[in-house]
Image: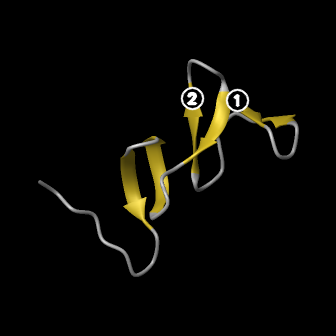
Amino acid sequence: YMLEQDAVCVDRCPLGFYGNSSSLLCERCSANCEACESRDECVSCKADTYQLYL
């Protein structure tokens, strides 16, 4: 995946980003998400935030 802000290719995107398999870019997770599988699929939350299950 391409980490655009550093202009480097990586095997895994850093914390706070996910690998978009369509664009092959590391894209930012949603605001309160520490780690994610996609923009809206949060795996872990940032400190002092909680995941809401419906």
Of 32 and 18, which appears nearest the observer?
32
Of 48 and 30, which appears nearest the observer?
30
Give the x, y percent position of residue 2: 76, 32
Tell me whether the residue at label 1 lies in contact with that at label 2, contact meaning CB atoms closer than 8 angstroms. Answer: yes
Residue at 48% from the left image edge and 53% from the top image edge:
30
Indicate the quadrant containing the N terminus: top left, top right, bottom left or bottom right. top right
Packing grade of label 2 (10 A; few <14, some 14-19, many >=20) is: some
In the displayed structure, 51 sits above or below 47; it is above
Local SS, label 1: loop
The quarter of the displayed image where residue 45 is located: bottom left
Indicate the quadrant containing the C terminus: top left, top right, bottom left or bottom right. bottom left
Where does label 1 land, which residue? 1
Extreme-top residue of the structure: 22
Name the amino acid type tagged 1. Tyr
Residue at 21% from the left image edge and 62% from the top image edge:
52
Q: CA distance from mark 1 to mark 2?
A: 8 Å
Name the amino acid type tagged 2. Asn
The quarter of the displayed image where residue 48 is located: bottom left
Exactly how many numbered labels are in the figure? 2
Mark 1 or 2, closer to the camera: 2
Local SS, label 2: strand
